[in-house]
Amino acid sequence: MIENEQDLVNGCRRRERTAQKRLYDAFAGRMFAICLRYLKNRADAEDVLQDAFVKIYENIDSYRGDSPLQYWIKSIVVNTALKHIRKQKNTMELDDVHSYDNHVADSEFTLSGFQMQQLLGFIQELPTGCQTVFNLYAIEGYQHNEIAELMGISEGTSKSQYSRARTLLQQKLNKEQRFDNESVRKTQI
Amino acid sequence: MNQSEKHKFEEEWERMFESASETPPPTVWDAIEKRLDKDGAAPIIPLVWWKNPKVAYAAAAAVALLLVSWPILQLTRERSENAPQVATRSLPTDSAEETTLPEAGQPATADQEPLARAEAKADPAQSRVTGTRSGRAPMEGSSASSGGESQLASHSAANVPSVGEVPAAATERNSLETAQPSALALREPAQKSATEPNRANSSGIGTEDGNLGPTLRESIALLSPVGVSEVDVYVQKRFVFYKKEFPEAEITPPTQNREYWAGVGVMPASFNPGVSVTSPPAAFSMAKASRQSLSNSSKAGLSYAVQMQTGMKLSKHWTVETGLSYLQGNSTFESDGYVLDASTNRSANVLEGALLAGAGASANREYAFSPSLSQDMNTAAVYIDLDQKTGNNYRFVQVPVQAGYVLNPDGKVNYTILGGTVANVFLQNEIESGAGSSFINTANDGIYRSLSWSAATGVRLNYRLSDHWSANLTGSYQKALSSSLRSGSSLESRPQLYGVAWGVRYVF
């Protein structure tokens, strides 16, 4: 549990290094996991985490305490990640193909059998546009119109990208499950 | 697929990652810290003026203004320079003979004046259209199209950059200049009249072209504006994604990383005044005990100090601090014997004797500090070889000024290495002899220096209790830099102190 957030924020406002370090210690783990979801490799995720925390410390005065500190920090991390993606790849493959909405629905869908690292790998293997939209929609909980505004794309593009991401992920999950089932069968034989 | 299945998919992913955490490598924090240090150390006013962003912006704005204004000025100048030429060239209307430059000073004849007026009366709008056409003519290789147009129009068009940019005012100005002929305008018709006055109306560029060489014609053609349709068109495709910029939070300049603190503490200490007798007091010399008088020592006693401190963090590692401390220094002076005044039965050990001598040497005082002694005891002094202990209770007010270097400044526990000087303001020394008598020396007695200096060093262990409060334990050592007794005394005292202070500190 994080110690008194207000004390931390006040310490950071006074540019106290101890408070800054404690803030970092409290949130860096969760924020690094977010960075890893948005980017393709650890090096980029580390860069984004570094940039994001510098921004956080520089702009801590603008945090008014309306929302929990974690959400404020998370929004800065996500924005920094998006900015990094834009810088890294100016033309992101974002097409409006609607043919991806044919994935198999499964009411019993579960990810319980998967490790988080496995799932993270699947997300990182997605095309960049799909990866970003998927993260924003499925995990962060943004709506498509918000994503469209956030990324400067149309709402339709956001939907098609998400649909494509979902199909690709489903395929990866199915493939992994099949492989696991076969392994189990072979072991039983 | 229904909506609930969709939600199930997303919920699963969200659930898997909602508490996801991955420890970043320590290098990330190191890099952040470096950047924060760099930002904090950024100078407010750059030492080099051209590195000042404001100066750079002003310079950029000036260059941009120059770049924009220069072509406009040039264009304006060209137009103003070209205007009379148009008027001048508009007049030669006829034959090839007119292309030869007329000589100045030739008078205009009356029948040629209407010729110029006739052209001047041409509709400005028509001139504009004609100009456009004639401008295209050389490129198209058709001289016939321009043949019937006035030369005025053709030259006007040649001097303007593009279609539609011919200002009506310019045409009017040409007309006016023609209507009110200048010296040049008047002299050209004069030459015309000399040759073929009746060909004025049928003149044109077609006639003129017939007498021009091919090089000159090409030059004229190059001067003519190129039609829009003849300009090569290059299509540049631009793909822009993610144009949207996220609103950045307002960047506020970081405040200076400087903190202040105040603290209180108490220090149990071992205080040794380091008193030594440098020359035998007179009473001991009289008692033939000079040698014995030099055999003595001071022993430290349990002392304490009450401290108030205040300090400031100069940088991440460096601090400076000062304060006020009240020191009660207890010690014992041991001597091998004492002298006894046989006539009065008064006794004094070597310390008392030396202090008395010192007081006598320093000033003619009433020895108020020593009521049991008098200067007359030298007359019948007898040395008694019996160990004697004398208690000394010193009282000082100390003002330390110390610099500190902090190790592990970001940790919950950090260490500070201290070094500096201490100003010791002497208050009093109460001497309690073995016989039970006591007397007090103060700074006014002229024996002790009012102010003496010590060097101080120490190590502090600081434990952060909260953002504002911390507790500390400080081991310190002080050693006098000079004697705390005035010169001229047969005593010397160089106090030293070892202590361990416990305190609390409030960080502002």
Image (cartoon, rainbow, N blue to C red):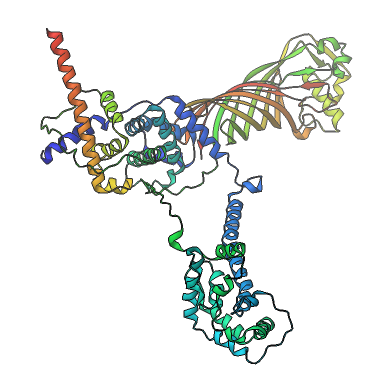
Q: Residue furthest top?
A: A189
| Figure quadrant of residue B389 | top right
Residue B251 visible in the snapshot: yes
Task: State the quadrant of the C terminus of chain A.
Answer: top left
Relative to B434, say whether B364 is above or below.
below
Q: Quadrant of residue B419?
A: top right
Q: Out of B284 and B170, give the one closest to the viewer.
A: B170
Residue B117: image location, x then y, percent? 58, 87
> Quarter-wise, where is residue B450 in the image?
top right
Residue sitting at x 45%, y 35%: A20
- Residue placed most toward the observer, B504 or A183: A183
Left or right: where does residue B36 sit relative to residue A49?
right
x%, y% of residue A182? 15, 15
Q: Is residue B342 above or below residue B59?
A: above
- Image quarter (top left, top right, bottom left or bottom right) of the N terminus of chain A: top left
- At 15% from the left and 10% from the top, the residue drawn is A186
Residue B257 visible to the viewer? no
Across and down, in percent, residue A114 comes to: 21, 23
Task: Report whether A125 appears left or right of B442.
Answer: left
User: Is residue A29 toward the left or the right of residue B224 in the image?
Assistant: left
Near-viewer residue (B202 or B113): B202
Coordinates of residue B76 in the picture (x, y in percent): 59, 69
